[in-house]
Amino acid sequence: MSTSAQPTKIKVGIVGATGYTGVELLRLLAQHPHAEITAVTSRQESGMPVADMFPSLRGHVDAVFKTPDEAALDQCDVVFFATPHGVAMKEAQQLVDKGVKIIDLAADFRLQDTALFEKWYKMPHACPDILKESVYGLVEIHREKIAQARVVGNPGCYPVTVLLGTAPLWSPEKALVEARVVADCKSGVSGAGRKAAVGSLFSEASDNFKAYGVAGHRHHPEISAQLKALNGGKDVHLTFVPHLVPMIRGMFSTLYLRILPEAMDTDFQALYEQFYANEYFVDVMPAGAVPETRSVRASNKIRIALQRHDDQLIVMVAQDNLVKGASGQAVQNMNLMFNLPEQTGLEHVAILP
């Protein structure tokens, strides 16, 4: 009895898989029909079965943590870096030379301006040549470039909401809004990572609400650079204030923009619906609706809703900060880089309640 040959699976490596974005990558890739997890690294947990650290993966992931030296990352087709800033750029050249594609969930390949990177991340960039060829991994904006890329810088979580929340407004044909955005953003505590930190303790974060990074947040230059690109190379003034809310996962950004006098007759609801008509993961909600974080929990969907008051446009955006804001976006990038349908392995329905 003859059987048809099975398509070759993508050999995937994950560096730094002990954090929240790492375990999200493992969860998503374990169910991906065209991916095979072949290397999972952690220096501290080397030798431990992944499922011992994350019991949710029992029966789904058989891998054992290895040190980067033991993991044979150069035998992978793609390596995800779910590591602190500064790790991926030190390993990128060696892996790219071996034909391995890279998706970095940190900031090493988000900012093309090395001086700006060094200012905000307090370290010199280790591979400026690879940085020049890398692509900013916001699929809905840079789809064609990502498909051809060897190195992708996965966007930050807050930038995804601000950029997709305003992208339809930066029309090259006609200016619709003032080049000024006020972004009032909130994130669940998982956005701070899995490290032990006083601000993430239950008794600190629970039953509390606070702003942080008001004097300057690392996502500010990233958002500003991408807004400028969307606006045809013209600067967009950004006021960005992130907040920590007492929930585990989820992100909600409220964006305020001023409509120009000559654009007062614009139907912004129709504009957004048309702009995102063919985007599987972007849901433009009906007029008058308001998104909720629980409507996207554990899914790669991002929901956008609009309200208008005279010349003020309010855009509300909800996403799961660990999925569309991080690991789901990264898998979406991988799908493009390997010529797969974008939604492959990412069609999970949000969890409710």
Image: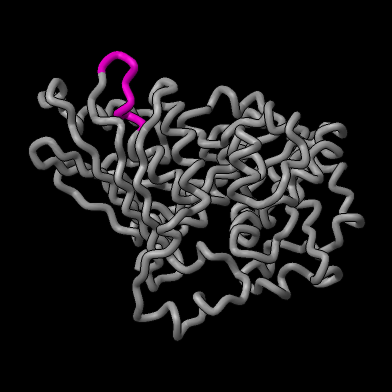
Can you say whether 160 is above or below 203 in the image?
A: above
Q: Which residues are magenta?
A: 167-174
The residue at the far left in this view is 310
Q: Give percent across and percent down for residue 182.
A: 30, 45
The verdict on residue 172 being magenta is: yes
The residue at the far right in this view is 70
For the N terminus, the image quarter is top right
Q: Residue at x 81, y 34 (%)?
A: 96
Along the horizontal axis of the image, is 348 left or right of 309?
Answer: right
Can you say whether 198 is above or below 303 in the image?
A: below
Answer yes or no: is residue 287 visible.
Answer: yes
For the C terminus, the image quarter is bottom left
Along the horizontal axis of the image, is 215 left or right of 207?
Answer: right
Q: Residue at x 57, y 34 (%)?
A: 136
Q: Residue at x 23, y 25 (%)?
A: 176
Q: Give percent across and percent down for residue 98.
A: 87, 34
Q: Give percent across and percent down for residue 154.
A: 59, 42
Along the horizontal axis of the image, is 241 left or right of 12?
Answer: left
Can you say whether 185 is above or below 115 in the image?
A: below
Secondary structure, magenta segment, majority class: loop
Give the camera-side residue of 32 and 197. 197
Give the camera-side residue of 123 and 157. 123
